[in-house]
Image: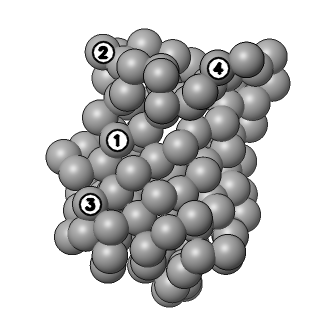
Amino acid sequence: MQRIKDIRPKELVPGITGYYVHGDKHTLGLVELKAGSVVPEHHHMHEQITYILEGQLDMIIGGEPCSLTPGMYHIIPSNTPHSAVAIKDCKAIDTFSPVREDYKSVDAAIGWKLEPNNA
């Protein structure tokens, strides 16, 4: 058994840090987002579930606005464009299936496919 915060963190974008563990079929992450940080609109082949532990995360998922606060979650289907802005400092749990191979190395580039207006 290990503590997730003992894992070497991966900076996704400035202000957003994740601690990721990987099984054979999925990835689990504890994500910390500083207020004001932005996840640009992107998509990936992975189904994603985002669950908010603390703070407020305003997302746009498939063109629909979605404001998540503690105890709320959203399922993001594979290849669905999505973005986010941390309104308050946030802690979230993200799961991905299949495994996020691009998250296994903290130094590897992230495999997000940015939408045309963010490329």
Amino acid type at circle 4 is Gln
Q: Is residue 19 above or below residue 13?
A: above
Q: Is residue 75 above or below residue 23?
A: below
Q: Is residue 68 above or below residue 105?
A: below
- Give the foreground label among 3 and 2: 3
Residue 33's disc is none
The answer to whether any part of residue 85 appears in the image is no
| Quadrant in the rendering for residue 107 | top left
Contact (Cβ within 8 Å) of mark 4 with mark 3: no
Q: CA distance from mark 4 to mark 3?
A: 25 Å
Q: Earlier in the sequence, mark 3 or mark 2?
A: 3
Q: Is disc 4 placed on a helix, strand or loop?
A: loop
Q: Earlier in the sequence, mark 4 or mark 1?
A: 4
Using residue 67 as the reference point, say whether residue 22 is left or right of it. Answer: right
Residue 17's disc is 1
Residue 107's disc is 2
Q: Earlier in the sequence, mark 4 or mark 3?
A: 4
Q: Determine the residue positioned at 39% across, 51% down.
A: 32
Q: Which residue is mark 4?
A: 2
Crowd rating for badge 3 (residues with CA inside 10 Å; few <14, some 14–19, many 20+)? some
Using residue 70 as the reference point, say whether residue 16 is left or right of it. Answer: left
Amino acid type at circle 3 is Lys
Crowd rating for badge 1 (residues with CA inside 10 Å; few <14, some 14–19, many 20+)? some
Q: Position of residue 115 (x, y in %)?
A: 36, 56
Q: CA distance from mark 1 to mark 3?
A: 9 Å
Contact (Cβ within 8 Å) of mark 3 with mark 2: no
Amino acid type at circle 2 is Asp
Q: Earlier in the sequence, mark 1 or mark 2?
A: 1
Q: Quadrant of the N terminus?
A: top right
Q: Position of residue 91 (x, y in %)?
A: 47, 58
- Give the foreground label among 4 and 1: 4
Q: Is disc 3 placed on a helix, strand or loop?
A: loop
